[in-house]
Image: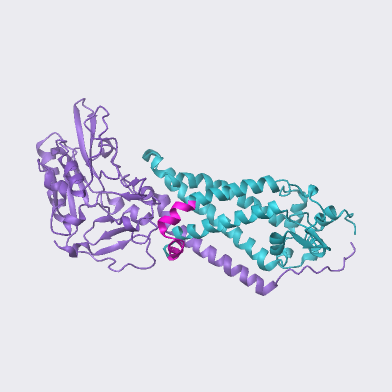
Chain colours: A cyan, B purple
Amino acid sequence: MSSEAMPLSPASVPAGEIQRYTFQERLCHWFSALTYVYCLLTGLAFYTPYLFWIAVLLGSGATSRFWHPIVGLGFLVSILWMHSLWRRDMTISGKDKQWLDQVNNYATNRDNLVPPQDRFNAGQKLFYWVMFWGTILLLISGLLMWFPEYISFRVAWIRSLAVLTHECAALITIGAFIIHVYMGLFLVPGSGRAMVRGHVPAAWARVHHRLWYDRVAGKPSST
Amino acid sequence: MSNGTLQIKAISGHAGPVPGRDTSRDYDVCKLIDVTTCIGCKACEVACVEWNGYPFRETVFDNTYQTMPDLEWNYYNLIRFNEHIAEDGTFSWLMRKDQCMHCADPGCLRACPADGAIVQYSNGIVDFQQEHCIGCEYCVTGCPFNIPKFNKETKKVHKCTLCSDRVGAGLEPACIKACPTGCLHFGSKDDMKDLAAKRASQLREHTAYKNAGIYDPPGVGGTHVIYVLHDINNPEAYGGLPKDPRVPLLVRVWKRPLKWLGNLAMTAGVLGVVAHYIRYGPKEAVEKKETPK
């Protein structure tokens, strides 16, 4: 669903607020979050003996091993669903280059030096594409790891390459995930609430996503 | 030998040092397989299945005398038949008893993430503990000999135990006891190496097998199952015995440097965002006055 089609203020949105995420978008996001966190926790348990207790806590090592790939397929479904919802909003454009040039100022909270952004800023878009391609890598390597006995011993290197790829891809998504959770819960107040309730104050939209605000609020961007 | 030989010296997926690490008995145990005197009778296969209490599974005929194409989760021991034509045109049958090699540096144990699912005893036996196995099959990936086999129903991996239950009680493995030609021997690693060296030199001096030698691959730290081969330069001819087996490089990278790099990066990531919050704080949605451009 593109932002153009989004109603400015449906009945559920209080006065002075505008809708940021539809119900379907929020559902998709939290389904994705749930499946990712399960795979993250069980994956970390298989990753290092120092965290194997997580698998015990979640049932047992064997239980975690049984569900990890199945829940992983659920995560894949969530990513494909999300892709159908946000693909266009996440397209990287020339404006994003300008934002990335100012990423130091963004990271040090000198936001007045950062160019105005549309519905998602370039950082959010990068996060999206890291998770998208990371998921593709995790899927391919994960399928091979699920049934290694079907890979001929003559090409046994594929087995160990799959494990290594799975681990590298997972580590990259974990890095992105740490930043994502930090920004959503702590760095940008109001963004976590937006993903739960679906709406944001108009001022929040103007500060963080000026171009998007102007577009959905129907105002020229010169104000 | 007594139960003392089953003291554990290495555990898979264990956080921190292992009790009994680097311990060793006065001797490591070893199985010697002299392939030059194997007649392919498969008494060892039957004895293995009997001792381990499995029902005899269906055989698969593929125009050789081999019982089935590959080891199975409840079939730890298989005589591999190969027809071999030497450079001088002479034809021979190569018969090799295939089972776990009980590596001194076991790839399965290195790869395993489950605490205690794979153990190495101080006498050198590598044993799977199915009650701790989580069924991930990382051992299948780690093994350079393609030995561990997965049971799809119970989701546990199995392989030859070198009859650790018999050896712990002072008995020899079941396959050794069953062998009618004396091609199988069991004893200390040193004794078996001596015996193998004598047999190999006998073959070199008194037969046409001028390249006879001992297969005890150093790439995995040596093994606790060693072979005497007619031609030590061509182990692949014996049903795919690898020439220089090693724990796969990518498994070693994954289990050592990458793991510590990853742990460091994840910890640094979490500490980094905490530090960022303390230094810069949240981005409040306060509208500043526009600076005219």
Residue most extreme to the front: A11
Q: Position of residue B256 (x, y in %)?
A: 42, 59
Q: Position of residue B32 (x, y in %)?
A: 17, 48
* Quadrant of the rendered image containing residue B214: top left
* Vertical placement of residue B78 versus A33, above or below: above
Q: Position of residue B68 (x, y in %)?
A: 26, 35
Residue at image coords 9%, 41%: B180
The residue nearer to you, when weighing B199 against B96, is B96
Q: Position of residue A58 (x, y in %)?
A: 46, 61
Residue most extreme to the bottom: B278
* Residue B117 in sight: no
Q: Is residue B72 magenta?
A: no
Q: Main secondary structure of the magenta part?
A: helix
* Residue B124 in sight: yes
Q: Is residue B158 left or right of residue A159?
A: left
| Magenta residues (range) | A50-68
* Vertical placement of residue B148 versus A46, above or below: above
Q: Quadrant of the N terminus of chain B?
A: bottom left
